[in-house]
Amino acid sequence: MNKLIFIDTINKIPPKYLHTPVQKLLEFHNMGVYHDVYQKPQITIGTCMDYRVVFRIPDKFAYIIRNGGSHLEHSDFHLAYSIAVGHIKAIAVIGHTDCGMLNLEDQKHKFIEGLSHSLHWTEQKTTGFFDNYYLENEIYDEVQFTLKQVATLREKFPNFVIAPFVFDVKDGFLYLIDEE
Ligand SMILES: [Zn+2]
């Protein structure tokens, strides 16, 4: 089990993230440090579309790639764009607790009922839709899924600062995933 580290002071930040935009992200979001003014993005955040995941960061500080479950498998070009053209200096992959993309199979009934009701789809069409898509959207575990994505990204973008986080929807803070 990888521990989640709550960072509320600069001396708790691992050295590899010091003096990078990951440090600034933690200062703004977790420590309430007064927002600097930015004209250019510093970091790209990959996270979930969840309405509870909200960042306390300055305007223009970050590119944010969002989708259900914080999937970045199909975002190589967008990440590369943010590096190449946006000149960002770090990537933060941010999963979160209580994600809707966890245990999708258990939500099948609710999903089918909701979609049939809202879109007036037949049960057969809704079931087919769910069965087609749920496996590629399932994340199983927010911590392990985030770590897996970070490992993949580090292979694709070696020597780049890439940090794994979990956003806790209960307290609204960011937790660094301990990779030791
Ligand atoms: Zn989510």
Image (cartoon, rainbow, N blue to C red):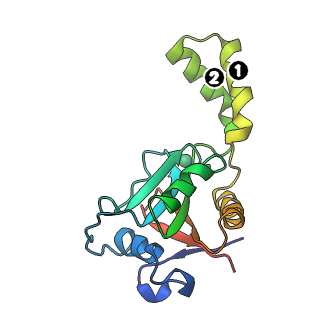
Would residue 45 be visible to someone looking at this image?
Answer: yes
Question: In the image shown, does 92 or 116 lie closer to the viewer?
Answer: 92
Q: Mark 1 falls on what kind of element?
A: helix
Question: In the image shown, does 9 or 63 lie closer to the viewer?
Answer: 63
Residue identified by numbered label 1: 127
Residue 90's spot in the image, x, y percent?
51, 69
Q: Amino acid at mark 2?
A: Ile
Q: Residue at x 54, y 10 (%)?
A: 120
The correct choice, above or below, for 93 with respect to 36 in the image is above
Dot label at residue 66 = none
Residue 80's spot in the image, x, y percent?
57, 57
Q: Around disc 1, counting alpha carbons within 10 Å, would you say few (fewer than 14), some (14 to 19), or many (20 or more)? A: some
Q: Residue at x 49, y 86 (%)?
A: 12
* Left or right of residue 80, residue 173 in this image: left
Answer whether labels 1 and 2 touch (C-beta < 8 Å): yes
The correct choice, above or below, for 40 with respect to 78 in the image is below
Q: Residue at x 59, y 72 (%)?
A: 160
Dot label at residue 112 = 2
Would residue 97 be visible to someone looking at this image?
Answer: no
* Left or right of residue 77, residue 37 in this image: left
